[in-house]
Amino acid sequence: MTHRNVDISLSKAAIVTGTAILIMAAAAVFAMDIVLGNLVVHGDATATTNNIQNSEMLFRAGIFSWVIILICDVLAA
């Protein structure tokens, strides 16, 4: 078993972190404003369910954007 030291410069780490934060921000705007704003009807679960069923691709894109946010959050940390 070999141990590899991963040397990454501080500037490369800052670029990766900054890029991850920017991607995370864009994905969060999409997930919250576009997806949830169009699908969720506050106080009406039936309408929300119907919106999700009628816009399955938008719902899936919202889930995908949350996965992107999770990955970028790990990279930023």
Image (cartoon, rainbow, N blue to C red):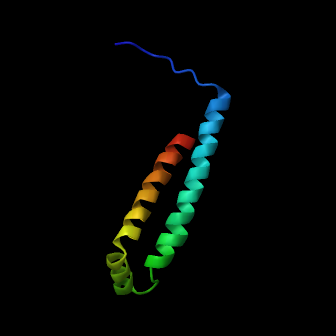
Q: In the rendered view, does 62 fall on the left or right side of 77?
A: left
Q: How many discs mark residues in the rendered view?
A: 0
Residue 77 makes an appearance in the image:
no
Above or below 39: residue 18: above
**Quadrant housing the C terminus:** top right
| Residue 13, quarter of the rendered image | top right
- Pick the residue in front: 59 or 3: 59
The residue shown at (37%, 86%) is 47
Residue reaching furthest to the left: 53
Q: Is residue 55 above or below residue 61?
A: below
The percent coordinates of residue 7 (x first, y second) are 57, 21
Q: Is residue 29 visible?
A: yes
The answer to which quarter of the image holds residue 51 is bottom left
Q: Is residue 21 left or right of residue 6?
A: right
Q: Position of residue 33 (x, y in %)?
A: 55, 71
Identity of the residue drawn at 47% across and 46% down: 71
Residue furthest right as drawn: 11
31 left or right of 13 in image = left
Q: Position of residue 2 (x, y in %)?
A: 38, 12
Q: Is 22 drawn above or below residue 9 in the view shown?
A: below
Q: Quadrant of the N terminus?
A: top left
* Residue 12 in the image: above or below residue 55: above
Residue in the foreground of this view, choosing between 33 and 44: 33
- x%, y% of residue 69? 50, 53
Point 63% across, 31% down: residue: 12
